[in-house]
Image (spheres, coloured by chain):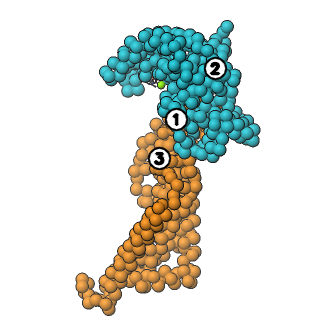
Amino acid sequence: MTPVLALERISCTFLSRDDASERYTAVDDTTLLIGEGEFVSVVGPTGCGKTTLLNVAAGLLKPSTGTVTVLGRSLGGINTRAGYMFQTEALMPWRNTLENVVAGLEFRGVAREEALERGDAWLKRVGLSGFGKRYPHQLSGGMRKRVALAQMLILNPQILLMDEPFSALDVQTRQLMENELLELWSADRKSVVFITHDLEEAISLSDRVVVLSAGPASHPIGDYAIDLPRPRDVAEIRLTPHFIEIHAKIWRAMKEEVLKGYAQQQKQ
Amino acid sequence: MPNSRSNKARSGRLRLRALQVLVLVLLVVIWHVLTSPTLLPPIYFAEANQAAFFFGEPVKVFARLWQWFVSGEIYEHLWVTLVETLLAFLIGTVSGVVIGLWLALSPTASAVLDPYIKAVNAMPRVILAPIFFVWFGLGIASKVALGVTLVFFIVFFNVYQGVREVSPVVLANARMLGASPRQLLRHVYVPSAMSWVFASLHNSVGLAFVGAVVGEYLGSAKGVGYLIHQAEGFFDMNTVVAGIVLLTAFALLLDWAVGLAERRLMVWQPRSIETERT
Ligand SMILES: Nc1ncnc2c1ncn2[C@@H]1O[C@H](COP(=O)(O)OP(=O)(O)O)[C@@H](O)[C@H]1O
Ligand SMILES: [Mg+2]
C-alpha cells in the first residue's frame, strides 16, 4: 500500500538571521510514512522539531534535503490535500466564528449561501451552534480550538496535520475534545499526523506513535503500533492494564531523550 | 444590591461632572474679573482696558459667538473647514493605505524609498503651505493638500506596521485554507493593517483639521482659520478668542464622531475586559 503522506530523509537546517555561519539543524534524516486512514502521533521533547516537521508536511517550509510525497505526487507548494491545525491562535480575529469556519470555502469560491449553510452545520457538529456571531476574543480557549477544528474539517481534507492542538487546554476540556476528535475521525477515517509532547495523549488517540529524539538533529528513535481496541474513551482507556504496559514500554525509550532535551534547555 | 451600587457610581459620576463644570465657570469668572475695565483697578497694566485688549472679554466673546450663529454667517466658514478636513482625511488615508500596503509587501521598493520617506516625514510640512498656495491657489485645494501631507504619514506608518505585524500563524492558516496571494491581501493584510489605521483615527482626523485651519490662517478667503486671521489684523481679540473656542468645540465634536465610528468598526477587537454593564 502506498502511503498517503511520505516524508523521506527530511533534514531542516536553519541559518541564524544575524550570523550566516551560525546554523541549527532541527530535524535530521527523518522518514515518516503515513498510511491511508492511519492516526499517527509524533511525540518528542519540546523544541525538538515537531512543528518544523509538520510545516514541511504542509508545504509551508521547504526542507533542506529530502522529499515530501502526497498521494504519490511530489509536493511543490502548499499541500492542498492537507488541513492544518496550528499550535497557536490561527483564527482571523476580524472574522466572527461563522466567517472563520467558512473562510476556506470562500477562498475556493463556494457560493455564499451554500458556504454559510455548511458553516452552520459544522458549528453544530463541534458544539458551537448559536456562537456564530461571536468574535474569537469572545470565546474560551476550548471554543476557539473547536472553531479551528471546524474550519479545517469543512474543507474535507484527506490528511489532517495537528500541532499540539489541545496542549493549551485544561485536562477536562482536553479529554472532551480528544473524544470529539476521535468521533469525528472515526466517521470517515482520514490520515492524521498528530503532534504532541504528551505521551498519554499520543497513545490514547493513535494507531501508531513515533518518538523523536531531542534536538539538535532530531530524528525518530522509536515507532510503536498501538493495538488498543476502538472506539476508545480517552479517559477510560488510560486506566486499562494494556495501556499502562504500552506507556511503560515507550516511556523507557523516551526518558533519556526527555532528560537530554531538558538539559539542553537549561544550557540555553 | 447591584442597584444601589450602580446608583452610587452614577452619583459619583454626576459629582465629577459638576466639578468639571465648576472649574470652567471659575475660569470664565476669573477671566471676566481680570479683564473687565471697571471691576478692578489696573493691577499690572497701566491702562484699565489694556487687559481686555490682550485677553479679550468673555462676555464679548460669547456675544460674538452668539451673533455668528444667529446671523448664520459662521455656517459658511464652518462648512469650508469641515470639507477641507474631511477631504484631507479621506485622501490622506486612502493614499497612505495604498502606498503603505505596496511598500510593506515589496521589500525592494521599501528599501529603496526608505531614506526619502524618513526625510519627508522629518520635514516640518507646514512650510509647504506657500508652495501649495502657488500650485493650488487660495481655495480649498491648498488646505486639503496641506492636510494630506500631515495625514498621509500617520496612516502610512500605521499600515506599514500593521502589515509587518500580521501574525505569521494567521497568514499560514489562510494559506492552508487555500487563499491565493490576492485573497491573502484582501482577507489578511488589509484587515490587519486597517486595525492599525483605526487605532490612529483620532490622530489622523486631528491632523487633517490642523492642516485645514493652518492653511486657512496662512492664506484664504473662507473658513474659521481665515476669520481668526482677519480679526487679528484688526486687533479684535474677542473675535480671535471666539474663533479659538469654536475650533476647540469643533475638534471635540470630530473626536467624538471618530470614537463612534471606531466602536462600530472595531467590534472584533478585544477591549481590556468586557462584562455586562448595569
Ligand atoms: N525559523 C526558524 N529559524 C531558526 N530556528 C528555528 C526556526 N524555526 C524553528 N527553529 C528552531 O528549531 C527547533 C525546533 O523548533 P520546533 O519545530 O518549533 O520545535 P517543537 O515544535 O518540537 O517544539 C527549535 O530549537 C527552534 O529554535
Ligand atoms: Mg511546536
Q: Which residue is mark 1?
A: A89
Colour applied to chain A: cyan
Earlier in the chain: of badge 1 and badge 2, it is: 1
Q: Is residue B77 above or below residue A241?
A: below
Between B181 and B199, the residue placed more toward the observer is: B199
Check disc 3 and report the residue beneath it.
B157
Amino acid bearing label 2: Pro
* Residue at x 53% of width, y 16% of height: A240
Circles 3 and 2: CB distance less than 8 Å?
A: no
From the image, tell me which residue sits under label 2.
A231
Left or right of B57 on screen, residue A1: right
Q: Nearer the viewer, mark 3 or mark 1?
A: 1
Q: Nearer the viewer, mark 1 or mark 2?
A: 2
Kindly indicate which chain is depicted in orange in the rendered structure: B
Question: Can I make out residue B22 in this image?
Answer: yes
Are discs 3 and 2 both within one chain? Answer: no
In the image, residue A102 sits, relative to residue A200, either above or below, namely below
Q: Quadrant of residue A127?
A: top right
Asked if ligand 2 lies within 8 A of label 2, the reply is: no
- The chain carrying label 3 is B
Mark 3 residue type: Phe
